Image (spheres, rainbow, N blue to C red):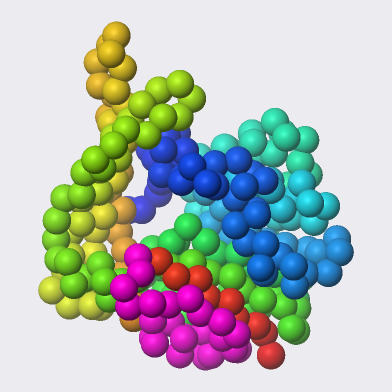
Amino acid sequence: MTSYNELAEVYEWLISDAKLTPAEFAASFDDVISLLPSNARVLDCSCGTGQLAVGLAGRGMQVAATDASEAMVRRTAELAEEFGAPVRAERANWEELPDHFDDETFDMVFCVGNSLHHAEGARGRDAALESMSRLLRPGGRLVLTSRNWELVRSRGSRLDISDHLVRRNGRDAVVIYRWDIASQWEEEHHIEIAIAQVDAAGPVLVRSELLSCWPYRHDELTAELHQAGLRTERSTYNPEAENYTVVASKA
């Protein structure tokens, strides 16, 4: 079962150097943040360890952050406290969002960090997108980032071991991905992510987690957004690129 409770404690090794601080993470979305009104209400859904949520709050926005992992929510709350950022952090999966917030509450909902593929198949994605759409005011936008699953599946099952050390908090680590690619698109796939912390004066400390995922094609995502009442305004999808961003507005 996907939980991120193990990886939550070492998640910073999975964040790129360019997005490591809250301000840097928020700045990576400057093109869509510029579309927001002053004092906008924003939800960071699948918030991870809170870099984006805290970065948005630092710009004066009213920010809520949710994640299905209790450990991620805890780390988000800790980061918000460290930066003195007023972030409302709560544990909730996508289907539970309408239980926590009124309909048409937010100007923008972020679902970033390649998280949507953890929704269980087409039915799960539909439920997730419908929940997020309900929370957007008319004209509000969903900002979603995704892996290029067409590219991922074309490479098949494999082991990817980073060719360099990543330094965080004065320690180095190697990041390892093990991809278990099912034969059919609609079947459950798995990604095992391992963080092997290297210390010259001590043993290697390894944390790993096996994550379930259900991939989708770019055109499927576009159709599912439309079904949830969201119109795609822009997409950076490129068949040769590893990741892409979709911005969709609520009619």
Residue furthest to the right? 38
Looking at the image, residue 215 lies above or below residue 139: above
Q: In the depicted view, which residue is nearer to us: 23 or 95?
A: 23
Residue 25 percent across, percent down from the top left: 60, 50
The structure residue drawn at horizontal position 23% and vertical position 78%, both measured from the top left corner, is 185
| x, y percent for residue 18 | 52, 46
What residue lies at 31% left-to-right and 63% top-to-bottom? 213
Q: Is residue 240 magenta?
A: yes
Q: Is residue 17 left or right of residue 122?
A: right
Name which quarter of the figure residue 139 lies in.
Answer: bottom right
Up-down relation of residue 218 to residue 20 (above or below): below
Q: Position of residue 176 (x, y in %)?
A: 25, 43
User: Where 132 falls versus 197 (above or below)?
Assistant: below
In the image, 229: left or right of 193?
A: right
Q: Is residue 84 left or right of residue 18?
A: right
Q: Which residues are magenta?
A: 218-242
Does residue 114 appear in this view?
yes
Q: Residue at x 67, y 76 (%)?
A: 141
Q: Is residue 103 visible?
A: no
Residue at image location 54% in from the left, 41% down from the top: 20
| Residue 76 position in % (x across, y down) | 61, 42
How many marks do you count on the picture?
A: 0
Quarter occupied by the C terminus? bottom right
Residue 65 falls within the magenta-colored stretch = no
